[in-house]
Image (spheres, rainbow, N blue to C red):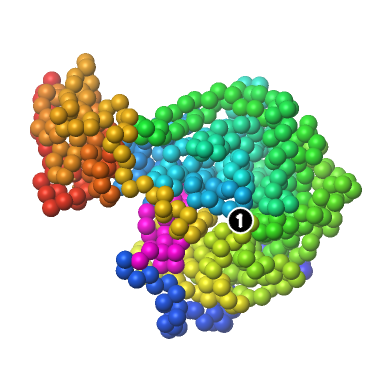
Amino acid sequence: MKSTQSKLTAWLGMPLAFLAVTILQSCGGNDGNNKNNAVSDDVASAVYVPPGEHDELYSFLSGGFNGQVSVYGLPSGRLLKVIPVFSQFPENGYGYNEETKPMLMTSHGFVPWDDLHHPKLSRADGMADGRWLFVNGNNTPRVARIDLRTFETVEIMEIPNSAGNHCSPYPTNNGEYVLAGTRFSVPLDLEKGGMGDASLDEYKDKFRGSISFIKVDKENGDMDLDFQILVPGFDYDLANGGKGPSNDWVFFTTYNTEKAGTLKELGASQNDKDYLAAINWKLAAKYAAEGKAHEMPANYYHNKLDHGTHQAKSTLKKKVRYLLPEECPGMMYLIPAPKSPHGIDVDPTGEYMVVNGKLASSLPVFSFSKMQKAIENKDFDGEVNGIPVFKYEAVLHGEVKEPGLGPLHTEFDNKGNGYSTMFVSSEVVKWSLKDLQVKDRLPVYYSPGHLVIPGGDTREPYGKYLVVMNKITKDRYLPTGPELVHSAQLIDISGDKMRMLLDFPTLAEPHYAQAIPADKVAPNSVKFHKLDENRHPDAVKSEKDVSVTRQGKTVKINMTSIRSHFAPDNIEGIQVGDTVIFHVTNLEQDWDVPHGFAVMGANNAETLIMPGATQSLRWVPKQAGVYPFYCTDFCSALHQEMQGYVRVSPR
Ligand code: CUA
């Protein structure tokens, strides 16, 4: 055991490239899917979607450090759309135009770039309902909601008392809450609010984490930060909730339970075991409703896109309520889990909680019914900050035998199997929940992080496919210099043996994905915004109503675009140093006819206006001249002629 562990530790310290190659060589080419093998016709036809036909599923892959979500069709692996969330997006002007800039407002100011990790579909009765997609901003803690009727970000909630919003978001099974857990613990000042000043030597006493409970309106999806639980100062890694019998519970993996702060100098990751934190979210909500919550000052923004005006508004919130676990008996427990566990995944029945023991290379499976018994019998082994710690054996169902090296994440099919990614041994491992025996292994290229099975985190997985998101690409595609695209692989899981179907490149770094049958989303997709429902204060609904109005040094140009001209298209009366605001309404009432708008030299130069919508660009010209503007999106045979001029005279 000891030698296996030290071998593993040595491996983990190796450069990844070397590691991947070593493991591939040691696999001895047993995969049958390596790139030199001819792809059989049935594999090709399994992913072939003929021209004009649609994919069976939508998949939503996080963009990681590009702050966006990318939408792919499955099984084809075709990229359908990029949805900007936490980052400005030059394609459609998100975060550049005046309507969407407020979406990126935070208590730290305008933050136009973030690290987006985990998409989670909204749920009803434990199943993805196809209405919304929730995603987390990891760096500057935020949770966003994407409306799947328009595939646009409609709401962003900043999370106070959090740092590295990693175990987030987790939507409860009936859409009551979206939960968000902090990664880093930070010194919280409960009197003045926000972060206090403390040295890392004071970590044990002063640092705390938080789990946020964001209430979600059942009708329109609006988010509201209801309360937080201030939890012991560990690092919280990933979250997933129960189903069926465990519906009221949510689980968080933790590390740094030494409360050391950092790995290198201060000695995190010394303990043999960290914890899986189990929180009864329903009881927490009850405690909060019954007046157990305290209140503290806070500073965080809630940004929302108004449906009618299509303008985002930022609201600064000044207070947050919080619960302390030590004051709320029965709300929180700790389960010992192998050293630095990563993913936590609950099987479709809700009975088994699978912890992916990254550093220990073990996959312990905990039993929810045993946990209930252990609570009844008070089968505890001490406590941390007043939170009871279970005895490991009292809640353990069993451990998967020899799963592989570096387990990170698990999802489930509809036949009682778990599928786990092995980061170090670069493989997906299929195992049975019944006897915890490994059934199949498939090498993947290389070093997988997350994987997703359509519905694999719900009560009733759709199964059929598995998409594994690999961290290292190396030689899978034509080389493109030092920076390579990340890579996903589509695997057929319908038979006893897994079958590799497809490699497809991804955008930036997908950390997780969700997938859903297309018929749950496609029928609701909006084709264009209705012009007569456009309540934007500067919307112009007919060419005869266009206007250029000056107020002091601000000039407002309320204009229209329709195939294939702007109105007005010859604008005069602007002087150097004026603030010019173009409010452009796209008068089209047809699907797939956006118009672009770009002005030479303007810093927020371009935007893309959907049919029926109004968008605005702000421009302060610095030099006199006659500046062309034009449509940037090919819209008709006269697209090239869709242009105009703004004359800027010396002051
Ligand atoms: Cu309008 Cu091109």
On the image, the x and y values in percent for residue 163 come to 58, 39
Position of residue 570 in the picture relative to residue 125 (left or right): left
Q: How crowded is mark 1: few (under 14 residues within 10 Å), some or many (20 or more)?
A: many
Asked if the magenta segment contains residue 619, the reply would be: no
SS for callout 1: loop
Q: Position of residue 426 (x, y in %)?
A: 57, 69
User: Residue placed at 62% from the left, 51% from the top?
Assistant: 126
Residue 233 left/right relative to 507: right
Label 1 belongs to which residue? 458
Front one among 355 and 40 = 40
Determine if the magenta segment contains residue 75.
Answer: yes
Q: Residue at x 61, y 45 (%)?
A: 174
Quadrant of the drawing holding the C terminus: top left
- At horizontal 75% and vertical 71% (from top left) the residue drawn is 435
> Considering depth in this image, is 11 or 548 the residue closer to the camera?
548
Report the quarter where the N terminus lies. Answer: bottom right
What residue type is disc 1 on?
Answer: Thr
Residue 42 appears in view:
yes
* Residue 224 spot, x, y in % from top left: 55, 32
Which residue occupies 63% across, 71% down?
430
Percent x, y of residue 303:
46, 32
Up-down relation of residue 339 to residue 319 (above or below): below
Q: In which quarter of the image is residue 573?
A: top left
For the record, the magenta segment spans: 53-81
